[in-house]
Image: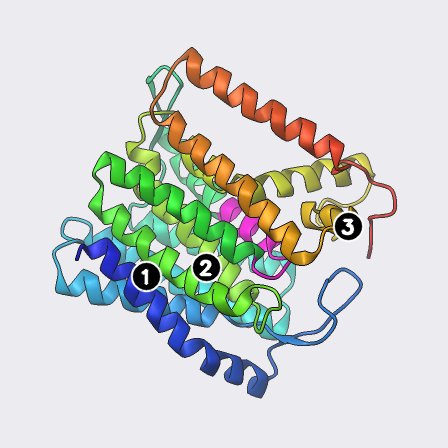
């Protein structure tokens, strides 16, 4: 059995086994997500399921990483992921219990990103559609921090329906896994397989009707690990525009966040002010049930993931044409469901 498959199985089984205990722990310690006018659920739900995701992923990585030679040559990067991931989980836990101010949470995310950069997990260069390298030099650190903090928050912001963030993260991680597999990068296959197993195990308890939410503990951890792994693997090895593969793989939450910023700016309200104009809110307003909305968003995420894989096989003008086609579909769909509308969706 390959190290990737073993990592997947171990992470999956551990999360499935420990999640009932995490649910009991959350209830006992008062980590409950109370309903409000922005949220869809109607009763308090435990919200620190990210603890189980973290434990499952960490256990799989340590067991396989220490018992095989899969991490040989990547010890520094693996240590950085573990330390940085643990730090972001601590920040998420504090936020789930104490509701940290946005600025404090952002500082915590920046600190976690700097941990990865300290362990040489950074974006040193990007490539254009024609294969030319663009070295970032002194911009490497700020670009790396922006990338990690940005992806950490996009997963966090899409966590609005049962099973949505976990499912989208699973699809995105599978995309990176397939790209890494095609390029022969066994280390990234191993890491993404563990992430897929952990997220999929959690999804059993999180799909509608959810028994537990992942909370900021889980959403920030998934986004953070995806960002870090993509820097180590897909960003440096994909024969296409660096960053395009992970951007498309996690395209749904990235687009939802981008549309929210545009919508709020056009509506003359603070960019960070919550509203009910997100994609999942729009789908619910159109009459979709929670399950139908989530499954539809899974399909769209899969489409973006497949597009990312296709882009690794082309370059030059063919890549540009494919990207323009994808962009036109996105803009058309966003307008059709009214994602840019500002009326009646702003809430304090």
Q: Which residues are magenta?
A: 149-163
Residue pictured at 13% horizontal, 60% vertical: 68
Whole-angstrom CA distance, mark 2 to mark 3, is: 32 Å
The answer to whether residue 214 shows anywhere in this view is: no
Q: Quadrant of the C terminus?
A: bottom right
Q: Which residue is mark 2?
A: 221
Question: Which label is found at residue 287?
Answer: 3
Q: Is residue 11 left or right of residue 50?
A: left
Closest to the observer, 188 or 201: 201
Q: Are marks 2 and 3 in contact (CB under 8 Å)?
A: no
Residue drawn at (43%, 14%), measured in percent from left and top? 318
Number of residues whose C-alpha sits closer than 10 Å to that of mark 3, classed few (under 14), some (14–19) or many (20 or more)? few
Please tell me which residue is depicted at 26% across the width and 41% down the height of the picture: 181
- Assign the magenta stretch its main secondary structure: helix
| Quadrant of the rendered image containing residue 34 | bottom right
* 266, above or below 202, in the image: above
Disc on the earlier residue, 2 or 1:
1
Pick whichever, 53 or 1, lies toward us.
1
Residue 82, numbered circle:
1
Q: How many marks?
A: 3
Q: Position of residue 5 (x, y in %)?
A: 25, 56
Q: Which mark is residue 126?
A: none
Percent position of residue 171, x then y: 45, 48
Give the distance between the C-alpha atoms of the residues marked 3 and 1, in whole angstroms.
42 Å
Give me the C-alpha separation between circle 2 and circle 1: 11 Å
């Amino acid at each position: 059995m390959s190290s990737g498959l073993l990592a997947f199985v171990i992470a999956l089984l551990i999360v499935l086994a420990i999640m009932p205990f995490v649910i009991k722990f959350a209830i006992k310690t008062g980590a409950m997500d109370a309903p409000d006018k922005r949220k869809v659920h109607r009763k308090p739900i435990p919200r620190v399921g990210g603890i189980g995701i973290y434990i499952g992923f960490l256990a799989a990585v340590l067991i396989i990483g220490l018992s095989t030679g899969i991490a040989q040559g990547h010890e520094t990067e693996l240590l950085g992921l573990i330390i940085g991931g643990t730090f972001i989980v601590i920040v998420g836990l504090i936020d789930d219990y104490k509701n940290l101010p946005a600025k404090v949470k952002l500082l915590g995310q920046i600190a976690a990103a700097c941990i990865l950069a300290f362990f040489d997990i950074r974006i040193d260069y990007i490539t254009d559609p024609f294969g030319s390298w663009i070295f970032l030099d002194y911009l490497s650190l700020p670009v790396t921090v922006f990338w990690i903090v940005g992806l950490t928050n996009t997963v966090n912001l899409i966590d609005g329906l049962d099973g949505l963030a976990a499912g989208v993260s699973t699809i995105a991680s599978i995309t990176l896994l397939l790209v890494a597999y095609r390029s022969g990068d066994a280390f990234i296959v191993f890491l993404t397989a563990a992430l897929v197993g952990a997220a999929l195990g959690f999804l059993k308890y999180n799909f509608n009707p959810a028994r537990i939410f992942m909370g900021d503990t889980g959403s920030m951890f998934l986004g953070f690990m995806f960002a870090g792994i993509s820097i180590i693997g897909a960003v440096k090895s994909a024969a296409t525009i660096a960053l395009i593969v992970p951007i498309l793989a996690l395209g749904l939450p990235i687009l939802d966040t981008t549309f929210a910023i545009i919508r709020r700016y056009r509506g003359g309200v603070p960019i960070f002010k919550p509203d009910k104009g997100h994609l999942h809110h729009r789908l619910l307003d159109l009459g979709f049930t929670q399950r139908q909305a989530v499954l539809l968003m899974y399909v769209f995420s899969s489409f973006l993931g497949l597009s990312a894989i296709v882009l690794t096989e082309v370059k030059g003008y063919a890549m540009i044409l494919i990207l323009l086609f994808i962009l036109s579909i996105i803009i058309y769909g966003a307008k059709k469901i009214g994602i840019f509308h500002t009326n009646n969706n702003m809430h304090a």
